[in-house]
Image: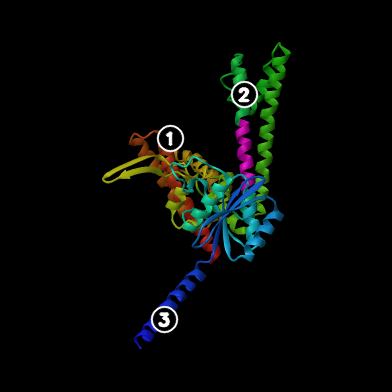
Amino acid sequence: MRRLRYDRVESSVELHAKGAAMKKNSAGSIRFVGLDVHAETIALAVAEPQGEVRSLGTIPNRPEPVKRLVKKLNAEGPWKACYEAGPTGYALYWQLEKLGIECEVIAPTLVPTKAGDRVKTDRRDAERLARSFRAGDLTAVWVPDAAHEALRDLVRAREAAKRDELRARHRLGKFLLRHGRRPPEKIRPWTQRYLEWIKREVKFEQSAQQWTLEDYLNEVEHCSLRIARLEESIDMAVESAPAAMREVVEALQALRGIAKVSAVTIVAEVGQLSRFSTARQLMGYSGTVSSEYSSGKKTLRGGITKTGNAHLRRIVVEAAWSQRFKPILSRALRIRQENLDPEVHEIAIKALHRLHNRYMRLLANGKCSQQVVTAVGREMLGFIWAIGIAVERKNAA
């Protein structure tokens, strides 16, 4: 009897353990696939839920091989994938999402790495991604939708054109400086009068130098026409954008220092501002928060981290320079604030006075102007977040 009772007790314990194991396996049966994506190839590795991490080889980075891979992995059970953000963009993400596969795009700088690891291959990178993905140690980036991605491409094309224009102006200006050609004092550089003075007054005896001047001048004018054409395209893109996006762009222009191009850049780079639960998260996303190294009772803070979106950081810092002027509504700003929601108008007026007072207070404390502007730009992000939340909340109601 004792033997039978012992067997019965042992059998019940075994059945309970098996049931718990089956329940655990059913809840955690998802496999984690790491993809090391390049222009021509994709290296694959899979991390089993409770098992090993193994390589699956390499496939071409083309739609058809990816479809065959999805079909093969689906036959073996549920799975989810991840890959690092990079020059290949989000085409693979959209393809996997369309095929019904959950995918995440990972921030490359936040992938854990071993300090002494000096061997880097595609296979090892894919295995590291799969292992970290299973452990939950990866940070996903925001993937824009089609409308935000199109607007972002257009805004960044204008930004590239502005950089090209600056280089072209530098080449022409330094060429004239080397040969001692200075404009009259009443003519400001890079105005229309300045360009007319170059065409009318600046001549060289040597044909090679004259051809060089004409080439530099043509490049400056070409860049200016290119920028004007892109800005006109941005205006048309905003008019054809979804109504919710267009309303946020119009509302952000209530802030001093943020006109249409700046507002469009913010919306294109950030997306929905409501995806940040607090304004501090948006500040961290821009990389304008101070770095910190604290241990015990010692607290050390340094310069800004610069680990966020550089395009957003550049826009807000440029806009912050306008806060050094007195908080007076200009005619252009009054026009931009017309017909806006009262809540947005109230936030903009509060920002106008608060940001100027902060600029003057920090400047009076002995801070250099660059540090002051960075601090003001960081605080401006708080007002940008508040305006975006107000508009998006109204649209959701």
Give how far apart the Cα atoms at labels 3 and 2 are.
Answer: 85 Å
Left or right side of 288 for 66: right
Residue type pointed to by label 3? Ser
| Residue annotated with mark 1 | 370
Residue 215 seen in the figure? yes
| Residue annotated with mark 2 | 171
Which quadrant, please, contains the N terminus?
bottom left
Residue 111 lies in magenta, yes or no? no
Q: Which residue of the protein is positioned furthest toward the bottom in this rendering? A: 1
Residue 158 lies in magenta, yes or no? yes
Occupied quadrant, residue 304: top left
In the rendered structure, are the residues bearing label 3 and label 1 in contact, judged by CB atoms less than 8 Å apart? no
Range drawn in magenta: 152-165
Of the numbered discs 3 and 1, the one sitting upstream in the chain is 3
Q: Of 272 and 126, which appears nearest the observer?
A: 126
Residue sitting at x 63%, y 32%: 164
Q: Secondary structure at mark 1?
A: helix
Residue 117 bears which disc, if any? none
x and y, in percent, of residue 61 in the image: 67, 49
Occupied quadrant, residue 11: bottom left
Residue 12 bears which disc, if any? 3
Q: In this picture, is 177 found above or below 144?
A: above
Of the numbered discs 1 and 2, the one sitting upstream in the chain is 2
Foreground disc of the pair 3, 2: 3
